[in-house]
Amino acid sequence: MLDLKTSLNSLGLLLTLAGIWVLYVNSPLNVAAFDGGDFETKHEDIERETNKRNARMKFAVYALLAGGVLQLVSNYVPSKCGAEPG
């Protein structure tokens, strides 16, 4: 069974990795630059997608921060020392 310290550290690492992945997927570097469009461009759809990506990026930043905090907290949780086998 994992102790609390290991569990918090592992959860922090998972949140950090999830945050990095969400930031990468929603990064503006992965989308073609918007050049103003033409008469068929649906600006409402572009704005909706932009708002959705910004919300995901905000979540990713919070996940990265939470992951880092959990990793820091896990450093101060005492390990099981001298646990008897059995």
Image: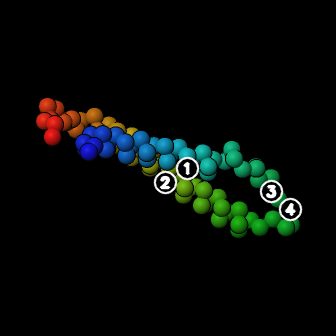
Residue at left 74%, top 65%? 43
The amino acid type found where label 1 is placed reads: Val
User: Which residue reaches farthest top?
Assistant: 82
- Measured as percent of width and height from the top left, residue 77 is found at 22, 38
Disc 1 from disc 2: Cα separation? 8 Å
Residue 15 horizontal side relative to residue 80, left or right: right
Residue at left 64%, top 58%? 50
Residue 34 horizontal side relative to residue 63, left or right: right
Q: Which residue is mark 2?
A: 59
The amino acid type found where label 3 is placed reads: Gly
Instruction: Point out the tag, 3 or 1, that comes first from the N-terminus.
Output: 1
Instruction: Point out the tag, 2 or 3, that comes first from the N-terminus.
Output: 3
User: Which residue reaches farthest right?
Assistant: 39
In the rendered image, the quadrant that contains the C terminus is: top left
Q: Which residue is mark 3?
A: 36
Residue 40 horizontal side relative to residue 55, left or right: right
Q: Secondary structure at mark 1?
A: helix
- Residue 10, placed above or below residue 39: above
The amino acid type found where label 2 is placed reads: Phe
Q: Which residue is mark 4?
A: 38
Mark 4 Cα-neighbour bin, 10 Å: few <14, some 14–19, many ≥20? few
Disc 4 from disc 1: Cα separation? 30 Å
Q: Is residue 73 visible?
A: no
Q: Which residue is mark 1?
A: 22
Residue at left 54%, top 58%? 55
